[in-house]
Image (spheres, helix red, strand yellow):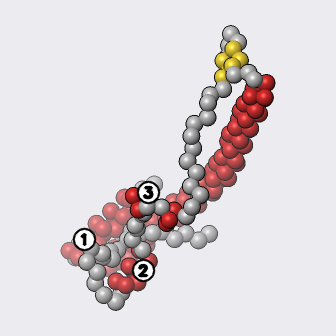
Amino acid sequence: MTKLHELGAEFESLNTMVEAGEFTLQDIEDQLESSMAEFNDKGKAVAYVIENLKSDEAQLKVMIDKLTARQKSYKNNQASLKRYLADNMLRSGINQIKTPDITISLRKPTKKLVVDCDPFELPMEYQVTSITADKKALKDALKEKDIDGVRLEDGDYSVSIRV
């Protein structure tokens, strides 16, 4: 069975031969009908593979979401157990637990920064700003006037599949 890209090349070749006048009208109709049916069958098969891949992707997303939630739960359990252990070691006055297979010790807390005010009230040297282009507004504005450094160009073709 012919591959889809080979059929595309066959259509291109057929078009060249038609332009050169190497086929009769009946030859062209027969070849087109045969090639078109095969091309449609191949296209349909590729579309079904795409649909199957979409389904697989959706299933993977569900699995990833479940595993991410599970991972978060494990991380929260670890943090909770560390807090529990630290609280009890502090309460008992024990700074270190040493056994042949594990050593547990309390570390002094590090300083953490707390910003109680609105960041806009801080001096400029302690503020970080981020500027990005408003693409929607630029696209709308380009319909009415030219803007230096901005242009519209054709995107890629996309395939629409409805089952």
- Sequence-earlier tag: 1 or 2: 1
Cα gap from disc 3 to disc 2, whole angstroms: 30 Å
Amino acid on which the number 3 mark rests in the picture = Tyr
Position of residue 135 in the picture relative to residue 65 (left or right): left
Cα gap from disc 3 to disc 1, whole angstroms: 67 Å
Residue 139 is situated, as x and y percent measured from the top left of the image, at 39, 80
The residue tagged 3 is 126
Amino acid on which the number 1 mark rests in the picture = Thr
User: Does 97 sit above or below residue 128?
Assistant: above
Figure quadrant of residue 141: bottom left
Q: Residue at x 66, y 46 (%)?
A: 68
Disc 1 vs disc 2: Cβ atoms closer than 8 Å?
Answer: no
- Identify the element where label 2 is drawn: helix
Position of the C terminus by quadrant: bottom right
User: Does 46 sit above or below residue 106?
Assistant: below
Residue 152 is situated, as x and y percent measured from the top left of the image, at 33, 77
Looking at the picture, tell me which residue is in the foreground, 115 or 73.
Answer: 115
In the image, which is nearer the foreground, mark 3 or mark 2? 3
Disc 3 vs disc 2: Cβ atoms closer than 8 Å?
Answer: no
Neighbor class of circle 1 (other Cα within 10 Å; few <14, some 14-19, many 20+) is few
- Sequence-earlier tag: 3 or 2: 3
Q: Is residue 120 visible?
A: yes
User: Does 41 sit above or below residue 68?
Assistant: below
Cα gap from disc 1 to disc 2, whole angstroms: 45 Å
Amino acid on which the number 2 mark rests in the picture = Ala
Q: Residue at x 34, y 68 (%)?
A: 11
Position of residue 140 in the picture relative to residue 72 (left or right): left
Numbered badge on residue 137: 2
Neighbor class of circle 3 (other Cα within 10 Å; few <14, some 14-19, many 20+) is few
Figure quadrant of residue 89: top right
Residue 23 is situated, as x and y percent measured from the top left of the image, at 27, 74
The residue tagged 1 is 16
